[in-house]
Image (tube, rainbow, N blue to C red):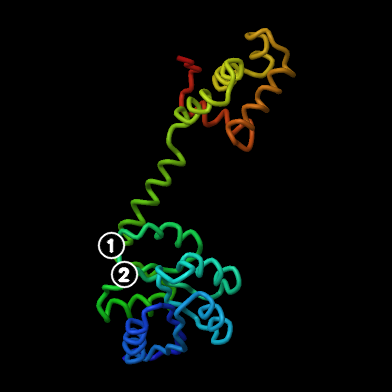
């Protein structure tokens, strides 16, 4: 038996599953302080019962589990929320983790695995079903790749819809390391005009600074191809 003072609130709109899970956890000395079947009841009981952990079904009536997660973390960020799902292909996995979920578990876990995951959370571990852990890793890698992938394609796309030919010329030369003064001389523009164009480029490409635009473009070996 596991001996601990661990208060858990179950949020699931399937009473039979919730009652079965409650029985399972309580036989392992985990204190299930309540069961909620929808978002409103989940918030009400979370406020009243002050659980340490909420096991939250991803599929809920009216409000999704993601909506409930947002509400709980906004009001009671100290509560650890573990999402429960029936599918390893759940499209909400990455979003839930970003929103502050402490874990994400498949409902088909056996009783020992489930209890170990929950008690591990109590010890500071991250409860994540192996299948979902693999998916999450792939998703993080994909997101990271997208964020750091060559900016060239984004620049070309922006060129087609936003940047003028003159702005592309300015970007090409500045990205090659030319100063604004040198760029202006090469294009027959004043330094002030070059600065103006760079300001517009920052705005049109939705960047935060000239340095960011230049860094991205230079990293991609941007050559100003306007074909």
Quadrant in which the N terminus is drawn? bottom left
- Secondary structure under badge 2? strand
How far across and down, in percent of the image, does residue 53 sit? 47, 79
Q: Quadrant of residue 198?
A: top right
Residue 223 drawn at (x, y percent): 48, 18
Mark 1 or mark 2: whose residue is earlier in sequence: 2
Q: Residue at x 68, y 28 (%)?
A: 199
Along the line of sight, which residue is nearer the eye, 124 or 168?
Answer: 168
Q: Residue at x 35, y 75 (%)?
A: 117
Residue position marked by numbered label 2 in the rendering: 106
Residue sitting nearer the eye, 204 or 202: 204
Dot 2, crowdedness within 10 Å: few (<14), some or many (≥20)? Answer: many
The image quadrant that residue 137 belongs to is: bottom left
Question: Compared to 65, does 208 lie above or below?
Answer: above
Relative to 155, 30 lies left or right:
left
Nearer the observer, 226 or 130: 226
For label 1, the residue is: 131
Q: Position of residue 141 (x, y in %)?
A: 37, 48
């Amino acid at each position: 038996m596991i001996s601990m003072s661990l208060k858990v609130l179950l949020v699931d709109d399937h009473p039979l599953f919730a009652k079965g899970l409650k029985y399972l956890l309580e036989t392992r000395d985990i204190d299930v302080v309540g069961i909620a079947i929808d978002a409103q009841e989940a918030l009400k009981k979370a406020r009243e019962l002050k659980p340490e952990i909420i096991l939250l079904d991803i599929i809920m009536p009216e409000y999704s589990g993601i909506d409930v997660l947002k509400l709980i973390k906004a009001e009671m960020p100290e509560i650890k929320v573990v999402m429960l799902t029936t599918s390893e292909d759940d499209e909400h996995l990455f979003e839930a983790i970003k929103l502050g979920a402490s874990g994400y578990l498949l409902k088909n876990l056996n009783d020992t695995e489930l209890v170990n995951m929950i008690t591990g959370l109590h010890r500071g571990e991250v409860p994540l079903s192996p299948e979902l852990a693999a998916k999450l890793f792939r998703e993080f890698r994909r997101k990271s790749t997208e964020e750091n992938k060559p900016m060239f394609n984004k620049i070309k796309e922006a060129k087609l819809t936003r940047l003028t030919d003159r702005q592309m010329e300015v970007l090409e030369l500045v990205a090659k390391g030319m100063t604004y003064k040198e760029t202006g001389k090469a294009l027959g523009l004043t330094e002030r005009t070059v600065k103006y164009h760079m300001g517009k480029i920052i705005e049109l490409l939705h960047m935060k600074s000239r340095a960011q635009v230049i860094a991205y473009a230079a990293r991609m070996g941007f050559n100003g191809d306007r074909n």
